[in-house]
Structure formats: structure tokens, C-alpha cells
């Protein structure tokens, strides 16, 4: 009953905060979000599962109850956790609590509705990462769209309605395409399937002879059709180039705490689903079309990084960086080796924390300066040494320097993909993406953080006394990055 | 600061999560290996 307690505590918190007065909503939401955070922490500490949830492994905190029976199909409330979902649950609860705290300053209207929707969003995300029955999973998957739409459309920037509608239309159409793909796979198994339970479907699909042809098409064609539709559906959510155009608009218009959740957790829904559905259920199709999928991955890495290089808005830079980072995840998945897929899953977690950190720092700079444009500010290290120190550390994380989580994720992905059946050329080209990432992040930092202080807005930032501790922190950040660069080049 | 600690913590000791991730990933990879082996055997 741990997962039910986790989701229910979040839903109850959402309801309480929605009814609370605006002036107390932020503090109340933060306090109530500690319950799911503590529950996920306890679940992680007591985690004792082994194997993969869909492939007959031992799940932790599993519950199965018959929920609804209609036609000849039964819907089960089936939830459980394995080594893929547990880290993402911890990521979700940590980021939600921090996003709520970071919203105390920028969100100054309709606070109770804002925090209520953020907690409702968290409940949906936790459901996506724990559900093991397709319909339950799909309900949570769709539920996530609703609060995110309102969070962008109500509390966003000047073009918030356009960004919110674009986000909703893109992701909702993608969900429908994915839905058709999965049902094609289920119906192709004929009367042998009487439940739409992901564990049953995953194991049946892999059994030779169970998938039958439909409308004169061979079983292999049906599998390819289902794989393609599911891949397209999830590719929008990740997002993979060329399905990425909703993401920069959504990020730029969304308030910072929402951007933190969007980049930190929502994008992981796409890669998580790709791993659970496409890569677990249809390994044969992955093997046959690995090179094509690798092309999508590498194009996302390089094109996302090049687009980031051309941006002036700090938030847009982080948004395009996310597209590039998600390309590494896809490359690791398609490598289909332990380190490749494991590294991709680790990279999901790592990117969640790093992108959350980057968006929060950009949000702090925006709150102080009321601009995010690289050309509007310089020498911010003089006025905001702590924020700048954290910005530098987060940027090093994005560049994948050692002692940062980004390093572990990217190294594992590269090791895994070099060791796989796909051409090493894909890995080599993707590695070049790191150089571009370092280029645009160092360029943005150089322009905004260092040099003489200048701010081209009507807002003033009071100079703050620079203490020895501040100087030590900045030097330490820069020095550790420099040493790490030397170490990594030596390795 | 909390997020920075998470980023550095995971960087210094990836095994905090990587162990359980690998445990869940291995069965997927074994399926693929078996599939490649079966096809290879069939071709031979």
C-alpha cells in the first residue's frame, strides 16, 4: 500500500492547498509535499526488488486489484516499483518540493490554485512511474497534461496561451498515436489476451507465434507498425528532433518552477515510456532499425546543441540543451547494452537534477534582474556570487565534467554505445555534442557572469559584500571544473 | 543547494542508483542477446 499512500497523500495535499487562502498556500504546499518526499525516501531505503517489473522480476510495493470489467477485458489497479521507476519517483518528489519552495517569490497571484495544480501534477507523474496496467498508466499519462496546461496558460509569460495550446495539442495528439500503436499490438495477439496488463503484454509479445497478422499484414509488419506509432507518440514527449518545437515555447513561457518540473520530470516520461514499451516489448524491431533510431538520437544531440548555441535567452539555452541531453538518452537506449541502457536511465535522473538546478538559477537571476537575455547583463558574479557559483557548478554538470552526475551518465552511454552493434561513428559524432555544449555554456557564462558589472534594465541590484566564503566558493567551482577537464582529457 | 548536492552526490557515487538500475536493465538486455543468438543459430 506504499504506492497508494504516496499518490493519495499527494492528491489530498493538492485538495487541501486548493482550498487554502492564497497567503498561506505556498508554505502549506511545501509542508504537505514533505509527506510524499518522506514516503519516497523510505521506499528507496527499504527497496528490495530484483529484476525488471515487466519481465517477471520481483517488484517492490506491488499491488494488484481487479478494478473494472468491461467487454471481455479486465482493468486492474496494478502498481509496482523496480530499479527503473524507483530513481524517477525519488527525482519527482525532490524536484516537486524544491519547485514549490522556488515558487514562493515569483508566484504572487492565485497561489492556492498554482500550488494545488503542482501537487496534482506530482500525483500524475508518480502514477505514470508506478502503474503497470495500461489503462491506469494511460489515465495518469493524460492527467499530467491538464495541470501542466493550466500552469503555463495562467502563470506563464506574454505568449503563454500560445505555448500552452501548442504543448497540449502536440502531446495530446502524440498520446493518441501511441494509444493506437499499443492497441494494435494488443489486438494482434488475438483472444489470448484478456487483460491490458503491461507485464502480461510484455511477456506475451516476446513469445514466438503469439502476435498474429492483421488485415493481411504479416506479424512482423504489425510489430513494426505498432513500434512506429508508439515511438512517434513518445518521441514528441522526449522530445526528439524534429518533434521538439513545442518545448522551447513551453519553457520560455512557463514560470521557472514549472520549467523545473517540465525539464526535470516531464521529459523523462517520454524516455521512460520508450524504455518500458518499445525497447522492452519489441527488442526485435529495435535490433532491425537500430541505425535509424541512432540517427534520430545523434541529430537530436547535435541539432539541439547548435540551436542552443544560437540563443540569447538563458532559458531557451537550457531548453535546447535538454533536447541535446535527451539525445544521449536515446543513443544509450538504442545501444541495447547493459551500460548503454543503464547509462541512459542514469542520464534521465542526472539530467532531471541538473536541468532543475539550471532553471532555478536562471529563475533567481531573472527575479533579480528582470531579464534573461545574455546581452543585457554582465559581471553578475560581482552582485550574486552564490548564485553565480551554483550556475557555474550546474554548467559543469551539463558539460559532463567528472565528480558531476552528468559525467557518469554520459560516460556510461558512450561506453555502452561503443560496445554495441550500432556503428561507433554514431557515438563519435554524439561525443562532439559535448564540445558544442561546453562552447555555448562557457560563452553564456563569460558574457553574463564575468567581466565588469553592467545591467541594461531599469532594475538595480545592490552590491553585496563579498566575503572570504563567497570567494572560496567561486574559486572552488572554477578550479574543480578546470582540474576535472584536465583529468577527463587524460582519461 | 539541495539539487547541487544531488548532482555532486550522484557524480561522486553513481552506485546510489546505478546498482538498482542495472538490476532492472539486465533482463531486457538478456532478451535481446537471446534473440540475436536465436537468429544467428537459425542462419547457421
Image: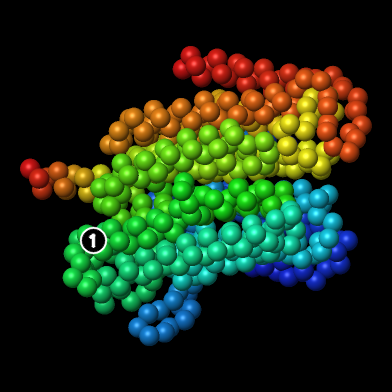
Position of A146 relative to A272 (above/below): below
Residue with the mark numbered 1: A221
Q: Vertically, is A468 above or below A375?
A: above
Q: Position of residue A34 (x, y in %)?
A: 72, 55
Give the left or right position of residue A30, taking residue A150 as reference.
right
Which quarter of the picture shows residue A200? bottom left
- Say whether residue A33 is visible: yes
Residue name at image x 27 percent, y 70 percent: A188
In the displayed structure, would residue B11 be above or below residue A260? Answer: above
Neighbours of disc 1 within 10 Å: few (<14), some (14-19), many (20+): some
Q: Nearer the viewer, residue A451 or A130?
A: A451
Q: Is residue A16 left or right of residue A92?
A: right
Would you say A109 lies left or right of A307 here?
Answer: right
| Residue ID at (45%, 53%) | A235
**In the rendering, at what x and y percent does residue A479 appear?**
67, 17
Query: Where's the N terminus of chain A, which quadrant?
Result: bottom right
Judging depth in this view, the residue of A259 and A197 nearest the camera is A259
Residue at 46% from the left image edge and 46% from the top image edge: A241
In the image, residue A186 sits, relative to residue A91, either above or below, namely: below
Closer-to-camera residue (A480/A305)? A305
Amino acid at each position: 500500500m506504499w504506492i497508494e499512500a504516496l499518490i493519495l497523500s499527494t492528491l489530498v495535499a493538492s485538495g487541501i492547498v486548493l482550498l487554502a487562502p492564497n497567503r498561506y498556500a505556498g508554505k502549506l504546499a511545501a509542508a504537505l509535499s514533505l509527506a510524499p518526499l518522506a514516503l519516497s525516501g523510505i521506499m528507496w531505503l527499504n527497496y528490495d526488488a530484483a529484476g525488471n517489473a515487466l519481465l517477471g522480476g520481483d517488484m517492490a510495493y506491488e499491488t494488484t486489484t481487479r478494478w473494472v470489467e468491461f467487454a471481455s477485458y479486465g482493468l486492474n489497479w496494478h502498481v509496482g516499483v523496480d530499479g527503473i521507476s524507483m530513481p524517477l519517483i525519488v527525482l519527482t518528489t525532490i524536484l516537486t518540493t524544491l519547485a514549490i519552495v522556488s515558487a514562493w517569490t515569483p508566484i504572487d497571484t492565485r497561489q492556492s490554485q498554482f500550488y494545488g495544480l503542482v501537487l496534482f501534477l506530482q500525483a500524475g507523474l508518480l502514477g505514470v512511474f508506478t502503474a503497470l496496467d495500461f489503462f491506469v498508466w494511460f489515465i495518469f499519462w493524460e492527467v499530467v497534461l491538464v495541470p501542466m496546461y493550466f500552469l503555463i496558460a495562467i502563470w506563464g509569460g506574454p505568449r503563454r496561451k500560445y505555448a500552452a495550446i501548442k504543448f497540449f495539442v502536440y502531446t495530446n495528439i502524440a498520446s493518441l498515436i501511441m494509444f493506437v500503436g499499443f492497441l494494435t499490438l494488443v489486438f494482434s495477439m488475438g483472444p489470448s489476451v484478456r487483460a491490458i496488463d503491461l507485464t502480461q503484454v510484455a511477456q506475451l509479445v516476446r513469445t514466438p507465434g503469439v502476435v498474429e497478422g492483421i488485415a493481411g499484414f504479416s506479424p512482423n509488419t504489425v510489430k513494426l507498425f505498432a513500434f512506429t506509432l508508439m515511438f512517434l507518440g513518445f518521441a514528441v514527449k522526449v522530445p526528439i528532433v524534429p518533434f521538439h518545437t513545442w518545448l522551447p515555447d513551453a519553457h520560455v513561457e512557463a514560470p521557472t518552477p514549472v520549467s523545473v518540473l517540465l525539464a526535470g520530470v516531464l521529459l523523462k516520461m517520454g524516455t521512460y515510456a520508450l524504455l518500458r514499451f518499445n525497447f522492452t516489448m519489441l527488442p526485435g524491431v529495435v535490433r532491425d532499425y537500430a541505425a535509424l533510431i541512432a540517427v534520430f538520437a545523434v541529430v537530436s544531440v547535435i541539432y539541439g546543441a547548435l540551436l542552443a548555441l544560437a540563443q540569447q535567452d538563458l532559458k531557451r539555452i537550457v531548453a535546447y540543451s535538454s533536447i541535446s541531453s535527451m539525445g544521449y538518452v536515446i543513443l544509450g537506449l538504442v545501444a541495447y547494452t547493459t551500460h548503454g541502457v543503464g547509462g541512459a536511465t542514469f542520464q534521465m535522473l542526472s539530467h532531471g537534477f541538473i536541468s532543475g538546478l539550471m532553471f532555478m538559477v536562471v529563475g533567481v537571476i531573472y527575479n533579480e534582474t528582470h531579464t534573461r537575455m545574455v546581452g543585457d547583463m554582465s559581471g553578475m558574479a560581482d552582485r550574486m556570487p552564490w548564485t553565480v557559483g551554483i550556475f557555474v557548478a550546474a554548467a559543469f554538470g551539463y558539460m559532463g565534467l567528472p565528480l558531476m552526475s552528468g559525467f557518469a551518465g554520459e560516460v556510461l552511454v558512450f561506453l555502452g554505445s561503443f560496445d554495441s552493434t550500432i556503428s561507433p561513428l554514431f557515438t563519435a559524432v554524439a561525443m562532439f555534442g559535448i564540445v558544442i555544449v561546453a562552447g555555448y555554456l562557457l560563452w553564456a557564462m563569460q558574457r553574463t557572469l564575468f567581466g565588469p558589472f553592467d545591467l541594461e534594465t531599469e532594475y538595480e541590484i545592490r552590491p553585496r559584500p563579498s566575503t572570504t566564503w563567497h570567494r572560496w566558493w567561486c574559486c572552488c567551482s572554477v578550479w574543480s571544473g578546470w582540474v576535472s577537464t584536465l583529468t577527463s582529457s587524460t582519461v | 543547494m539541495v539539487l547541487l548536492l544531488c548532482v555532486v552526490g550522484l557524480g561522486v557515487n553513481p552506485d546510489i542508483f546505478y546498482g538498482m538500475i542495472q538490476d532492472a536493465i539486465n533482463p531486457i538486455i538478456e532478451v535481446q542477446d537471446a534473440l540475436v543468438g536465436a537468429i544467428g543459430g537459425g542462419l547457421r
